[in-house]
Amino acid sequence: MKTVSSVLILSTYFVLYGVVHSWLASTSVKDWMRRRIGPSADRWYRLGYNIFATLTLLPMLPLMALLPSQKLYEVPSPWRWLMVGGQMAALLAAAITLLQTGIFHFAGLAQLVNDRPDQTGSLTVDGFYAWVRHPLYTFSLIFLWLTPSMNSNSLTAYILFSLYFYFGSFYEERRLIEQFGPVYERYQQQVPRLIPIPGRRYVAQNQQVSS
């Protein structure tokens, strides 16, 4: 019964987290901020959003650690270290992806110094993006599910994160279609969402389109 309560608490917290952050990332909220604050909203919004998202996600960690849970499995050596190695490879690939897309823009720092903070992004379709449309989500999922120790709390959290990444990718792509139009739609038709498929890869002469 305690384990069920833990699952409900974690699920409720994460659903509220997802709803609030999806709402804050919406175009309507950004437009409202522009009307209230002016053009400077584009300069500060991304950084403020990232800080708020990080701070409000942090309570998940103590909740997972302190709420009652049931141990599900513990992968023994040497397989444990193979899984940890896979996690390290996923982290490295995620870091390369961030560098490729522009880590300062992703963090919201490029907007602080750019003359046109509303136009600092670009559509990247090479590197890992040539194989999947959301490589950051893909590598995050690999990292999560290669965890060699699993209990009921971590399983609940990983399922919630997986659903968030999957459904969040649809939400994100609506914004990208608004921003890049037919260019993104053509890319979308050629490249899988999260799981690479042999033989499906985006190839274009001009592989980066500025917004």
Image (cartoon, rainbow, N blue to C red):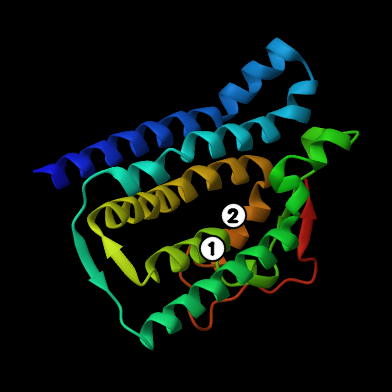
Position above or below: 4 against 15: below
Residue 178, image x, y percentages: 62, 40
Measuring 49% from the left and 50% from the top, which residue is drawn there? 169
Q: Depth check: 122 or 204 in front?
A: 122
**Extreme front residue here?**
66
Q: Is residue 175 left or right of residue 169?
A: right
Residue labelled with disc 2: 185
Q: In this view, which residue lies farthest toward the right?
A: 115
Q: Secondary structure at mark 2?
A: helix
Q: Residues within 10 Å of mark 2 (few under 14, many from 20)?
A: few
The quadrant in which the C terminus is found is: top right
Please tell me which residue lies in front, 76 or 18. Answer: 76
Q: Is residue 166 above or below residue 128?
A: above
Question: Where is residue 3 shown, x and y percent of the image?
Answer: 16, 47
Q: How many marks?
A: 2
Mark number, residue 200: none
Residue at far left of view: 1
Residue 5: % across, % down:
17, 39
60 sits to left or right of 140: left
* Type of amino acid at the residue the image marks with label 1: Gln
Residue at 39% x, 68% y is: 147
Residue found at x 68% / y 59%:
98
Question: Is disc 1 placed on a helix, strand or loop?
Answer: helix
Q: 100 or 158: nearer the eye?
A: 158
198 above or below 97? below
Q: Which residue is mark 1?
A: 189
